[in-house]
Amino acid sequence: MKTANKCYQASPATLDRRWYVVDARDQVLGRLAVRIATVLMGKHKPTYTPHVDTGDFVVVLNAGKVKVTGTRKKQQVVYQRYSGYPSGLREITMETMLQRHPERVLEYAVRRMLPKNALARKMLSKLKLYAGDQHPHQAQQPEPLPN
Amino acid sequence: MPRVTPGHATRQRRKRILKDAKGYRASRSTLFRPAKQTVIKAGQYAFRDRRVRKREFRALWIIRVSAACDARGISYSHFINGLKKAGVFLNRKMLSEVAIADAPAFDKLVEMAKKAATA
């Protein structure tokens, strides 16, 4: 059987970029992060190409109001960063993070689901998180995020 | 008998290796010994990766077909199972190309797969 020798490759010029919006209120953190990460990576489209950012934009409202299941998970999940100096380890629990930077909990969850490379930083720049239920992207006419 | 030294032959042999090593970084492109090692290793990688390439592309096609299936409310595995039962033997590459270039045709394929899976 003779088949085409080359298969489709997306290129930045032919991308079809969409905008999606989702309300994070009472959505389970990880379940929501999976859906967002899939769209940011472009894996929801048949034109997915690994070396090109084929993903769409995602606007998240009420980003800090996600649901965290389990009775003690908010105290048990700890975000760590290390400054490089001796005793420079900073730790912050999810509970305090939700108070200080409510949208960062979801951002971390999504970021860690993306590939660990330069393309991931481009993908993450398409994620727009807001602690409130308003967003300044009306002009892009975002559609509701598919399941 | 004049004395024969291997000077010319050696230079030609080394030039051949260094030609293959063009574009490598640092001493790997300029010095004979590192260049020779790197050229041999490059050949090994090339041999292995010609085989790996086939798997990587198949994985990519599966990701694409899976995305097209999810959008139509059927999982990839059910889709493939349905097609097999329906006697459709398009390979994954063609399925992914159909999903990109001809969405209505892919709708039909999904329909066929769904019907065959329940029958």
Image (cartoon, coloured by chain):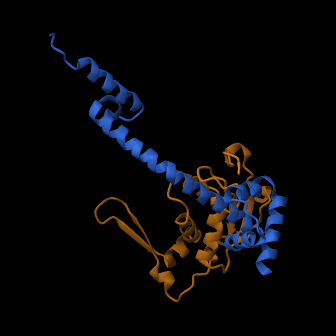
Chain colours: A orange, B blue
Q: Is residue A95 left or right of residue B96?
A: left
* The one of A58 and B104 positioned closer to us in this rendering: B104
x%, y% of residue A141?
80, 59
Please say if B3 is above or below B23.
above
Q: Is residue A6 left or right of residue A113?
A: right
x%, y% of residue A75?
47, 82
x%, y% of residue B17?
35, 30
x%, y% of residue A100?
53, 71
At 60% from the left and 76% from the top, the residue drawn is: A29
At 55% from the left and 64% from the top, the residue drawn is: A111
At 41% from the left and 42% from the top, the residue drawn is: B43
Could you tell me which quadrant the C terminus of chain A lies in? Answer: bottom right
- The image quadrant that residue A114 belongs to is bottom right
- The image quadrant that residue B97 belongs to is bottom right
- The image quadrant that residue A91 belongs to is bottom left
Please say if A10 is above or below B65.
above
Q: Is residue A106 left or right of residue B29?
A: right
Q: Is residue A127 visible?
A: no
Q: Is residue A93 visible?
A: yes
What is the tally of numbered marks visible in this picture?
0
